C-alpha cells in the first residue's frame, strides 16, 4: 500500500510551511467591529481595520442591505426641536430638525488611543435632504467621523439663528474662522451650522455646484475655530448602486492635533456579506503644527 501523500512531506519542509503560514496570519489585517445601532429592519456598525503594526488603516461604517431597504419613514426623529415662532408649542415636524441621528462609538481598539483623533460616528439620515434646494435636497446620509466629544457636540442647541436654526450665540461661535493651514482653500463657510453637529465647511468647487446631480461630497466640520469632524455625505441612490470607489481627500497643510489622519474616502459594496461600507482609509501619522495667523 502506498503511504498517504501527507506522510511524504519531511519534517523540515513541514516546519517551514508552518512558519510561512504563521507569518501570513500575522500580516493579515485585523478587523474589529464597534457599536451597532438599528436602522430600519437592519443595522449600521462601526469598524476599523488595523495594519500589521497595529495602526489604523481603515475606519468606517457598515450598512447591511436590510436596513437600506427599509429606512425610517418619518421625516424626523423629532429629537432636535425648538419653538421658533415662540407661540408656546412645538409644531412637529415643522419646528424640528429634519433628520434622524444615530450615535455609533468606534471600536475600543481605536477610540481609546491618544494618537487617533476620531472617537465616534454621528450618522444622520436625511429622508428629505436639506438645504440648499436643488443641490442637497435628495435623500442622503451624513457620515460624521467625530473628533469633538459627544457632550460638546450635543450641547450645540436648536435656536432661531442661521438657515439651520441654531442658538444665536452658538451660531457665531461655530463660525469662528479656522486657521488657514488647518483647512484646504476650497472649503468655505456657507453658514451651515446645524444643532448637535456644528459648522459644515463645503468644497465650493464640487461638481454639485455646477449643475451635476449630487452623489457624494467631502466636508470638514468646525466649531470655535477648531476642526471637529470629517464627513462623507452621500445619497442613498449612490450608496445602493453598489459602488467600489475611493476618492482622495483634500487635506489641509497642517493639523492641530497629532495623530493618524486619512488620505482616502471610500464607498464600497461587499457581495459576500451583502453590505455596504463608508470609510476613511490609508491613514498617515501627522505631527501637530502651530496655527497660522488668522487675517481679520
Image (tube, rainbow, N blue to C red):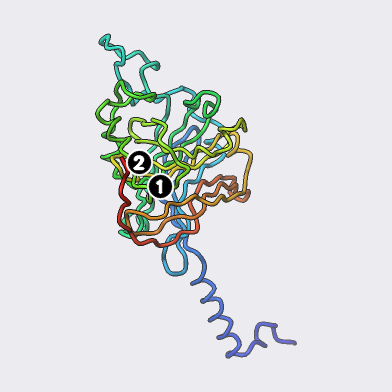
Which mark lies nearer to you, 1 or 2? 1
Q: Which residue lies at the image location 31% right of the left edge and 35% below the top edge?
A: 174
- Mark linked to residue 13: none
Q: Marks 1 and 2, how far apart in space?
A: 10 Å
Q: Quadrant of the N terminus?
A: bottom right
Q: Is residue 293 above or below residue 57?
A: above
Is disc 1 surrounded by few (<14), some (14 to 19) or many (20+) residues within 10 Å? many
| x then y, percent, for residue 102 | 39, 36
Q: Nearer the viewer, residue 158 or 204?
A: 204
| x then y, percent, for residue 55 | 42, 64
Residue extending furthest top? 87
Q: Quadrant of residue 36?
A: top left
Q: Quadrant of the C terminus?
A: top left
Is the C-beta separation of discs 1 and 2 under 8 Å? yes
| x then y, percent, for residue 98 | 42, 24
| x then y, percent, for residue 23 | 52, 76
Is disc 2 surrounded by few (<14), some (14 to 19) or many (20+) residues within 10 Å? many
Q: Which residue lies at the image location 33% right of the left edge and 59% below the top edge?
A: 288
SS class, disc 2: strand
Q: Which residue lies at the image location 57% right of the left edge and 85% below the top edge?
A: 16
Total tally of numbered discs in the picture: 2
Residue extending furthest front? 296
SS class, disc 1: loop
Q: Is residue 208 left or right of residue 45?
A: right
Q: Is residue 281 above or below residue 89?
A: below
Q: Is residue 278 above or below residue 258?
A: above
Q: Nearer the viewer, residue 145 or 173?
A: 173
> To which residue does mark 1 refer?
183
- Mark linked to residue 222: 2
Amino acid at each position: 500500500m502506498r503511504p498517504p501523500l501527507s506522510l511524504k512531506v519531511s519534517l523540515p519542509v513541514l516546519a517551514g510551511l508552518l512558519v510561512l503560514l504563521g507569518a501570513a496570519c500575522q500580516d493579515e489585517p485585523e478587523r474589529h467591529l464597534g457599536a451597532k445601532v438599528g436602522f430600519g429592519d437592519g443595522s449600521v456598525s462601526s469598524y476599523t481595520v488595523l495594519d500589521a503594526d497595529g495602526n489604523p488603516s481603515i475606519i468606517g461604517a457598515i450598512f447591511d442591505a436590510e436596513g437600506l431597504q427599509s429606512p425610517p419613514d418619518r421625516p424626523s426623529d423629532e429629537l432636535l426641536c425648538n419653538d421658533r415662532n415662540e407661540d408656546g408649542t412645538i409644531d412637529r415636524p415643522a419646528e424640528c430638525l429634519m433628520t434622524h441621528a444615530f450615535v455609533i462609538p468606534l471600536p475600543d481598539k481605536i477610540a481609546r488611543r491618544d494618537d487617533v483623533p476620531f472617537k465616534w460616528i454621528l450618522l444622520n439620515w436625511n429622508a428629505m435632504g436639506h438645504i440648499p434646494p436643488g443641490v442637497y435636497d435628495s435623500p442622503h446620509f451624513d457620515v460624521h467621523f467625530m473628533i469633538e466629544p459627544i457632550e460638546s457636540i450635543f450641547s450645540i442647541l436648536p435656536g432661531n439663528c442661521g438657515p439651520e436654526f441654531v442658538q444665536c450665540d452658538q451660531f457665531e461661535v461655530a463660525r469662528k474662522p479656522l486657521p488657514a493651514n488647518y483647512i484646504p482653500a476650497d472649503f468655505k463657510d456657507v453658514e451651515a451650522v446645524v444643532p448637535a453637529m456644528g459648522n459644515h465647511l463645503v468644497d465650493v468647487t464640487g461638481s454639485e455646484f455646477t449643475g451635476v446631480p449630487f452623489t457624494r461630497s467631502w466636508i470638514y466640520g468646525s466649531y470655535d475655530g477648531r476642526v471637529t469632524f470629517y464627513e462623507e455625505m452621500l445619497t442613498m441612490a449612490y450608496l445602493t448602486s453598489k459602488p467600489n470607489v475611493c476618492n482622495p481627500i483634500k487635506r489641509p497643510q497642517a493639523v492641530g492635533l497629532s495623530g493618524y489622519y486619512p488620505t482616502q474616502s471610500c464607498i464600497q459594496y461587499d457581495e459576500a456579506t451583502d453590505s455596504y461600507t463608508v470609510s476613511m482609509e490609508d491613514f498617515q501619522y501627522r505631527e501637530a503644527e502651530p496655527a497660522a495667523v488668522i487675517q481679520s
